[in-house]
Amino acid sequence: MGEEIKVIVFGLANEEYGIEVEKVRTIERMIPITRVPKTPAFIKGVINLRGVVLPVIDLRGRFNLAETEQTESSRIIIVAVNDLEVGFIVDTANDVIDIDTDTIDSPPEVVGGIKAKYLHGVAKIGDNRLLIMLNLAEVLNKNEIIQLEHLED
Amino acid sequence: MDMNAYLSMFIDESNDHLQALNENLLRLESDPEDLSIVQNIFRSAHTLKGMSATMGFEDLASLTHEMENVLDLVRNNKLKMDSFIFDTLFKGLDALESMVQDIIGGGTGKADVTAIVTSLKAIEKGEHQSQAKPAAASTASNGGASGGAALLDEFQTSVLLQSIESGHSVYHIVVTIREDCLLKAARAYMVFDFLERNGEVVKSIPNVQDIEQEKFEHSFTVFTISSVNEQELRKGIESVSEIQGCEIIALDETTLKEISGGSSSGAEAQSNAAAQPQTIAAQQELSTARAQTAATAAPAAPAAAPNSPAAAGGGASRTIRVDIERLDALMNLFSELLIDRVRLEQLASEVKSTELSETVEHMSRVSGDLQNIVLKLRMVPVESVFNRFPRMIRDLAKTLDKKVELIITGAETELDRTVIDEIGDPLVHLLRNSLDHGIESIADRIAAGKSETGIVHLRAFHSGNHVFIEVEEDGRGINREKVKEIAIKNGVVTLEEAKRLEDSEINMLIFAPGFSTADKISDISGRGVGLDVVRTKITSLGGNVTIDSEPGRGTKFSIQLPLTLSIISAMLVKLGEEKYAIPLSSIVETGIIRKEQIRNIHGNLMIEYRGNVISVISLSQVLQSPSYNEDNETETEIVVIRKGDKLGAVMVDEFIGQSEIVLKSLGKYLTNIPAVSGATILGDGQVALIIDPNALIK
């Protein structure tokens, strides 16, 4: 038996993803976002979270998935990694589960259209439920954003 | 005892004392005869020694101890300050500073100080080149005194002698305390208290500090000048409980000279020898005061010697130390209140209830006052930055072999802490630059008919919503021809451009990246990295630098800084759906222009504005606005902004109004967004971006 960890489960384009609970600060309903000019398209802008200004990223855009209209169930998950605080826009966020670290397998090359380097692994829950664990440090890697910006130029 | 709890206090106080030591040593250097400065230095050193010993920083304590020993000789006139002693003491201070820095960084404060300690010891023994001679050898009694075997040093003797001459009684008292006494120090204190009430205690053996720490057997000796007679003294002392008795001898000139001559024998002399180097500062101070006032025996006894040495640290200051993080938290909370206030004001104007409006109005006024106080709390005098400069200039001038006098004015001018933290390095650059490039060598100055000492002014003053800091020297001034030449060579400007430049523009060229006019690269400056860093830093603080220079007469750098970086007045504007804030400090005026007024000159949009032609900036283009384009309008609102001497007209959709806004950062994830300097939260809870006007004008 490995360690039990608590994971926040959220949905994005038909897949289920997980982030360790201690990296999540809060989960918010959609609130007005102020656009910030000259940033990559997936950076939607900044929000006012109880007096603190935080950037918000559309995770679909970050992973080059097709962006969709936001719905009633869309959420902003505020995560804190390496003293960066950022909000992620996700399709749904509705579950907290315990998983055993032993059940996390290293990810295949591409899962649900997302490159393996953004992933921490894939956890099997029950018989036919897969939970994709995100590698937040890589998702928030700024060097890559700079490269992206160069590509856009 | 958990030392960590005291560590931050120790660090704060050590820094204070080190600063005081630095300042006083500098003062002493310019006025080596003033023994009262030595007293101050000694006191700081002594406190520092005590603190570091308590905290277990042995190296710190032992180095301070050696410095203290030298200072003790100086203040007792047994050693004359010379440049070697000054340099050694300054070196010692540097070592102390780096040790304290090490402790701040989490280190143990250990350092190899043997070299400095050795030279300090050499000074102490009078072995350094200039050879310490016992000063004022004219006093006959001095012969044996320097050995430390005398009961009284020369100074104390002269005080006592003067007292006798002016008709006061001087007594030698040996007080014996009962052997079963539990609180010897307390009893001794009561005796001292009695003596102080009736006169002055000039000397005690062992010294006051040792007595306080109960470092004596069952008796101690004091020399006192008293206004009462022997009987009353005896009665007073013996009325203190647990005192076994006292032996009082009235002294006259002959007996006094005998004692100070060192002929006194036995245990007393020995204990004195041990105690001598540590004689407490407070007591010395009393003696000094006494000597100055020609020994009047007025029974007023201020700052009683038996009190702790810390009490002698000058006038009680009415301040407390507060953790900066708490101030920041207070500021954040206040910002939220401010946002709610703006929201409430909006609501009140919508609801149109007189009572509500009045209440909100009152609240606005109160919160306005509160805002002033909160902002003032964060204000720190620039002194905290300036105070390290005299020392820096001294060392630099020595290295460069120039004579320089630094004159600081307006050190009490206050600036927001965030600005203070950032302004130090740019000022160091400017001052170094002034000394290295500005002030000429002594020979050159004499040849130019100037006094050989160059003068550097460092001034700070308020003006409107800004603080100005100026660095001005009376050196050679900027050689504009040379500046042009180098700028062309380094590709900063073309030959054609250079011809059209005005003097002030040529001056500004020295701020260009990679620029340096120094013929050779020196340690101090001249690597061409300084000045452009200075400008970048100051611009990032929302400030501005300008240069005035006259060849042969000197150069003045003038830095303009905002008072605070946390709450600013801004103009809120609309671009379609979006709202933005433009800092009021860079706005000249607002207006409306018609489309046909805009002219296209070589691809640049310009308008005529009050007799000048200024460029027009499309904010919607800069910010890639999705919901506004001024091309669709026949009339457009403009905000005229200023950057230095340049003006620009920024086209916006609509003005919302002026408001106090709280500056928020965009966080670490979003950095270097062009033309955006930060964000603020509006009354409706939405985030508005703050435009950086400096980025709009090229």
Image (cartoon, coloured by chain):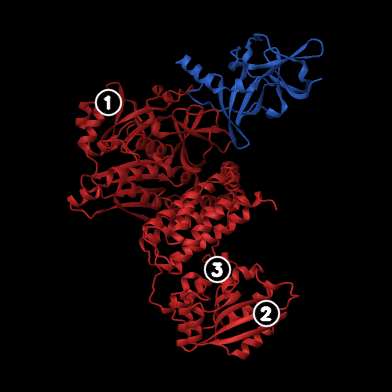
Three-letter residue code for mark 3: Ile
Q: What colour denotes chain B?
A: red
Three-letter residue code for mark 2: Thr
User: Which chain does tag 2 point to?
Assistant: B
Task: Read off the residue under disc 2.
Answer: B176
Label 1, residues with CA under 10 Å away: few <14, some 14-19, many ≥20: few
Quarter containing the N terminus of chain A: top right
- Secondary structure under badge 2? strand
- Between the residue at mark 2 and the residue at mark 1, the CA separation in whole angstroms equals 87 Å
Q: Are marks 3 and 1 on the same chain?
A: yes
**What residue lies at 62% left-to-right and 56% top-to-bottom?**
B54
- Secondary structure under badge 3? loop
- Between the residue at mark 2 and the residue at mark 3, the CA separation in whole angstroms equals 22 Å
User: Which chain does tag 1 point to?
Assistant: B
- Observer able to see residue B79: yes
Three-letter residue code for mark 1: Gly
Residue B267 image-quadrant placement: bottom right
- Secondary structure under badge 1? loop
Q: Are marks 2 and 1 on the same chain?
A: yes
Q: What colour denotes chain A?
A: blue
Foreground disc of the pair 3, 1: 3
Report the disc number at residue B491. Answer: 1
Task: Read off the residue under disc 3.
Answer: B280
Whether residue B171 sits left or right of residue B1 in the image: it is left
